[in-house]
Amino acid sequence: MPQKVDVIVIGTGSAAWPAMLRCRRAGLSVVAADSAPYGGTSWLRGCIPKIILTEVSRQVQHCRRLGEVKVIDTVPHINWRQLIDFKNNLIREVPTQMAAKMRDLGVIAVQGTARFHSPSVVEVGQEQFEGRYILIASGARPRPLGIPGEEFVITSDAFLNLPALPERLVFIGGGYISMEFAHVAARSRAKVTVLERGQRLLRQFDQVLTHTLLEASREAGLDVRTNVEVIAVERQGQDLVVHAKQDGNEITLQGDMVVHGAGRIPNTAGLDPKTGNVQIGKHAGVVVNEHLQSVSNERVYSAGDCAETPGMQLAPVAALEGDVAALNMLGGNRRTVNYKGIPTVVFTSPRLAFVGLTEEQAASQGLTYDVIRREGAVWQSNRRLNLKYAGSSVLIDRRRGRIVGASLLGPDSEEVINLFGLAIRNDIPLADLQDMPFAYPTGAWDIKDMVSEGGSPNSHVI
């Protein structure tokens, strides 16, 4: 007989933990199942290990730029083996710590692959659990490439654990994963090629700033190519050969390693959703209503990367959705997710950040808007590091006097973008940001230049 519990949580990552916490505090019995080590993608295979690598890469880049003006005598290089050991030491205890937290919270943690045995019963190994509610928070996995030789391509998980970095790497895809890891590899003295299928990189970001990032990437040694469709990978002796089409012409590239950076899809296939009467959508995610409840099985909720929602595949979005799903289990379907003003960052060097609406989205909503663009290389926040590539693009709703979108490129963009997110999410008037006496000289002070038509004289003091 299945063990009866109030809530079964499939996954232990960013979406799962807030739901476990809220349900246990409300007195519900909770089982959590995970086929991978406890902690989820963000802590073990995504955000946290990635930021360790990219931060070291950024520090190296800053030192190199300062070396150009002779204020640093010795320019450092990345010691790859030591970097991976450093990363591993920082995250090594996460699964054990997560298991201890779940135990202290009273969550029954089960290691193994979860799959539906019936619409209300989930099977994990030899154990079965019947849940009053079931939360699918199983995350995402690399998107199948569907090309001959796919078995020769490594995933981002494998890249994060390479004992040694090859001399020549080819990245498939020009999104977050490829660009971030390509920057790290290039600053580790590898020869790096990035192949993007579309006409431009990072399509959801501001086009002008994306082009500036492309210039910075090429200066850092990346060979970035667009309009390239990879059609096959094969091994020839010690080399991997990538076959592709660019603008209708067939091309080949050779490398020591090929890395998958072409996106991720919901990790739902192994759940046997048909048996659970869980509808899967065209993007392979769980189809949910506005309350994150399955449209086909009222016991089931879904949150994070495995749910088909308007939210981006980001850890903060997953955490927000997991909490809302739990609230709806506890109190009826009264809550919806507010996706407004959630920032996102590409951790290249320089870093590219975005929040709110793009120009295309603003136009489609019928907004009358202005765009304030700034060349950021003149800001002291960049000059003091001898940086060349920086800038901003801010969308203003002219009628309401509110910021509706912002894109930033530069050394402090990953922090400053949060202030724009705060303004958008809380409908703060543009005038309030223009009047705010930010600490000086800081990256936040540059906001006064970013949002003022005439600019801020103090931003350009030399």
Image (tube, helix red, strand yellow):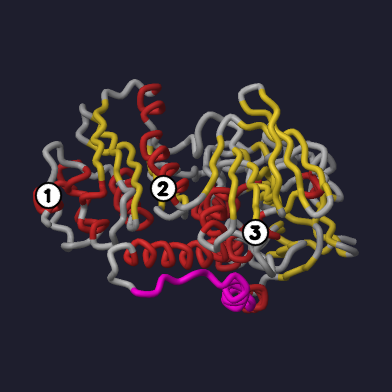
For badge 2, the amino acid type reads: Ala
Asked if residue 192 is among those painted magenta in the image, a careful observer would answer: no
For badge 1, the amino acid type reads: Asp
Q: Is residue 281 visible?
A: no
Q: Above or below — where is 339 with respect to 445? A: above
Q: Quadrant of residue 355?
A: top left
Asked if residue 82 is among those painted magenta in the image, a careful observer would answer: yes
User: Which residue: 80% across, 56% down?
Assistant: 114
For mark 2, what is the residue?
216
For badge 3, the amino acid type reads: Glu
Extent of the magenta region: 73-93
For mark 1, what is the residue?
435
Assess disc 1: are there few (<14), some (14-19) or many (≥20) residues with their C-alpha within 10 Å of its C-alpha.
Answer: few
Q: Which mark is residue 167?
A: 3
Q: Which mark is residue 423?
A: none
Quadrant containing the N terminus in the rendered view: bottom right
Mark pair 1, 3: CA separation: 51 Å
> Is residue 33 toward the left or the right of residue 394 in the image?
right
Q: Above or below — where is 76 with respect to 344? A: below
Q: Nearer the viewer, residue 462 or 190?
A: 190
